[in-house]
Every structure is written in C-alpha cells, then in structure tokens.
Image: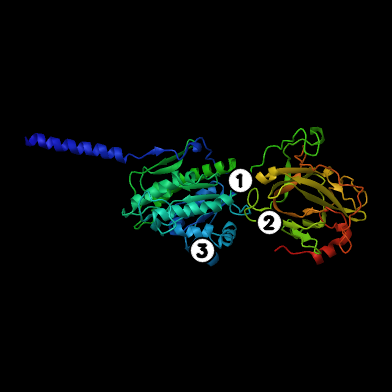
Amino acid sequence: MRYYIRWFFILLVICGIAISGLALTPSFVQASPQQQGGDSNPPERVVKLIFIHHSTGENWLTDGYGNLGQTLAENNYYVSDTNYGWGPNGIGDRTDIPDWLEWFRGDQTDTYMQALLNEGEQNANYSRTLPDPGGENEIILFKSCFPNSDLEGSPNDPPSADGWLSVGHAKYVYNEILTYFGQHPEKLFVVVTAPPLSDRSNAANARAFNQWLVYDWLRENDYPYNNVAVFDFYNVLTGKDGHHTVEDGEVIHQVANRDTLLYPSGDDHPSKKGSQKATEEFIPLLNYYYNRWQQDAPFPVPAHTEVDSESDSGQSDSDQPDAAPPDISGLIDNFEGGMPAGTNGWEAYWDEGTTSSLKCGAESGTGLRGSGLHLDYQISSYSWGTCGLYYEQVQDWSATQGLVFSIHIRQPEQVLHVDLYADGPEGQESYIFELDLTPEMEDDWIPIGIPWESFHRVDWEADAGSPFSKPDQVTGIAFGFGSEETELDGELWIDELGWMDGGEAAVEESAEQEVSQSEEPEEDEPGGRSLPCIGSLAMPLGLVGIALYQRNKHEER
C-alpha cells in the first residue's frame, strides 16, 4: 500500500511540474501586426540622439560595461546624454515616472526641450567616434531608474491623476506626455522601461505596467504617428528567455518566466552581462523604429503635386509647369543653427506706421526635419511685412536653375511673396514671385520649386515685369506679405531652402504669373500713407538703401 501511495505522490509532483511549466512558458509574440517585415539596418546618415538617464543608464552607455554608447556610434548615431545636475532648474535630477510631466507637460517644457534638443555634451564614459553632424538631437531616449519598478496598486488599475509611484498614476503620466510627442512628430521619442528589482513585492505590478506600455499605451490613445516607441529594458533583464529585439525583420517581444532582476551587480543596478545583453537587443530595435519613423514620417514631401485640369483661376494644364519634384543641388539654409555665411541671418521688417507686425526666425522642432523658418505675421490694410536674408557680397547662383523649399502653413487662401534682390547697373533691383497658399499646404508639407525666369521685376522699377536674368548677381532673398483692403493674419513655416539644379520644377503658380506693369501705386485716403506698390513684399532695397533698413529694422523678439 505504501508503495502505491509513494508513486501516487510522485505522479502528483510530475504533473505539478508539467502544469507549472505550461504556466511559465514564455510568450513568444510580436509587438503589433504593423511591425512585421521592418528594416533594422542603421541609418544611412549620422543621426543625433540624446539619452536622459541616471546611474543605470550611465553604466549601460559606458565602454567596457554596457557598451551602448560605442555601439550606437557604430550604427551611425551621434550620442549625447544627461545625468544628475543637468539642465535648467536641475531638471536632470528628476527622472522618476511622475517627473516626465515636468519635462514634457509643464510650464517650463519649452525651456527644458530647447536645452535638451541642443545638448551636445557627454555625461558618461563612452566613445564618440563620429563627427557632430550639426543641428538638433532628433531622437530622445528616456528612462526611469529601478525604484520605479516598485509600483503600488494592482496590475489592472486604470489611469489616475492621483498618486506617485503607482500603476494607475504611471499610466496617467504616459498618457499625458503623448500630447507633447504628438505636437512634435519630427522627433522620435523612445521610452526605455525601468529596470527590474530583486524584491518581488510589487514585481507583478511592474510586469503588468510594462506590458501595458508595449501593447496598449499607444493603441488605447489612438496615437496616429510612428514617432513614439518602447524598449522593454525591464523584460530583457528579468530572464535569459526575456527578449525585445528584431530578428529577420520581425519585432520579437518574448516575456521572461520571472518578474525580478536576473542580472544583479551586487545591488539592483544591472550587471555588465545584463547591460550588454540589453545593448545587443536594443540596437536592431532602435534601427527598426528609426526606419519606420522615417518611412511614415508626418508631413511627407509628396513625389509630385497634381495640377487640376482647370484651376480656380481658369488656367488649363498647358499653362502650368509640370509638377515634378525639383532637384536640389544644395541648401541655402536648413535652419538648424547658425547664420548662412556672409549674412546677418533672417531679419524681420514691417510697416512701422501701422499696426502691422512680423516675427521670423529659425524655431526648434517646427521644420520638415528639425528646425524651420517660422513667420508669424499680422499685416494691416494697405501695409506690408517681410522676412529677408541679405548678403554682404554679391552671390553667383548662375550654376543653378531656381529656388526650392518646402512650406507648411496655418492660414490658406493668402498670397506669399517670394522676393529676389540683385545688383544692377543703377543699384539694387527687386524681383517677385507670388505664391498662392492652398489648403494642401495647411494639411501637409508641400515642396515648391520656382525657376529663375518665374521671378519678375517689380512694377515700380525700370523694366517692370521683365523676368529675372541675373542669378550671378544675387544680393538677397525674402518671404513676406502685402495687403490691400484685407488684413492678413497667420503663420507659416519654411524648410530646406536651396537651389534647383536642372529638371522641371514643382511650381505652385498664382492666378496671374506676372506682376502688373500698368498699375500705379495706390494711395490711402488723405492723411494716410502711400506705398511703393500695394501688395509689395517689402520696401525695395533699391529705393531705401541698406542703411535705412538697418536704422528701421525690428530685431526679432
């Protein structure tokens, strides 16, 4: 009898082990259906990345420990980082999950982000073998430390504005900061989950929260962009069978069979082995996220602009240039910092005798990629305002075919004036092209190409209406507005301003291609002002001279 009882208990143990094995078998899943067949190759160009972290991140970056810094460099990322004591108001000290509200949703967010996007220093010991490509950081990597895995509450708690380190409040924080991320689809934000603890008291909560970040966070918020991603650092460090990486073009998120730290270093800082494992898994996943973001980036430049067979102005297809994408031979300004050589940068002018105003300048995070030229204008009736770039020496652009740029606007149904200034035998000469601002430009970034011959001499100068033929004598370019009876109010953004080199241009033409040669300058009622040309972009340099401009100019505020 004892013999059978003994074997009965043995069978129970075997069955129990088998059942437990089924329960603990790690899940082998992909993060989402759209993450299949992705490209995990490194970027083709050097991309600037900033990492917000404390001690665990420092170890992860360090050469000979986690090797993340040097491995990122090998994959074409130029890395900078923050640590304790960094930034305005010492914001670098605060990286707990609730602190992300201060970083991304607080009163000082613009100040912190301006500093972060322009940070280029190191706060950890890692190799930087790449030259600084210039411009802002494009990827923001941020991580909380391991105490943030000690989350109170219950695994299925809903988001809650109350609390501190709890499941519900952590969900609330990440939901809130999506607002900022959605306003800046030109940046890639990568959440690195907090590493695990050795203490299992709240390990189930940490596991549940990180699963929510990977699978449910963006979906529950109907987040529309590919500029937010998650790396489950926690999962990778909880078991040899815990993975989050890319294999054969597929994102693999395999949940480990334990919820506590497998790779301690004497305390809860991950060990060298665990940190190096995280590097090996993270790099292909980051490459994948970067390429996905680039392929599905918001405000994509369309391959071409379709022109209706009959436009609102009554022009037919035959009157419009072909809408092929322009070829760019180089950039005049990408607005990523610094002034174009031989200039004082972009300068704002407006009619001081009216209520008109215009502000312009490079602005972080507003361009097609990175910074862009931002114009904020209010132009009163029969007035003008302009944003110009003026050269100290005459420029020879004769090897090019015209201007190209991308534009995005807030207020359609207006006319933007694009001006060229040239050095002529009798002084400065002014040329203008009128660009209709269409609803498509409000919805998307639109590429514009303007051949030199599409600029025409302004009607208050000699040879009014004649096409521009002096690309070897350029002294300035400008964007601006002139109003007649209607007041103008709006914003627009310009990026990737450069030269066209051959081919047809994608030109958005106004209803009238030529500036009128017959109209005399209109005058206000008695007591008002007379302008050189109603609707002109700016007082022409040929009339007022550089000295008068310098005396009257308004510095951008």
Drawn side of residue 311 relative to residue 334, left or right: right
One can see residue 213 in this view: yes
Measured as percent of width and height from the top left, residue 58 is found at 46, 57
**Amino acid residing under circle 1:** Arg
Q: Give the CA separation, mark 2 to mark 1.
A: 23 Å
Picture disc at residue 91: 3
Q: Do the residues under discs 3 and 1 have CB atoms within 8 angstroms? A: no
Drawn side of residue 87 relative to residue 385, left or right: left
Picture disc at residue 45: 1
Counting residues from the N terminus, which is met first, the one under dot 2 or under dot 1? Answer: 1
Residue at the image position 80 percent from the left and 64 percent from the top: 352
Counting residues from the N terminus, which is met first, the one under dot 3 or under dot 2? Answer: 3
Residue at the image position 53 percent from the left and 57 percent from the top: 104
| SS assignment at label 3 | helix
**Quadrant containing the C terminus in the rendered view:** bottom right
| Crowding at mark 2 (Cα within 10 Å: few <14, some 14-19, many 20+) | many
Q: Give the CA separation, mark 3 to mark 1.
A: 31 Å
| SS assignment at label 1 | loop
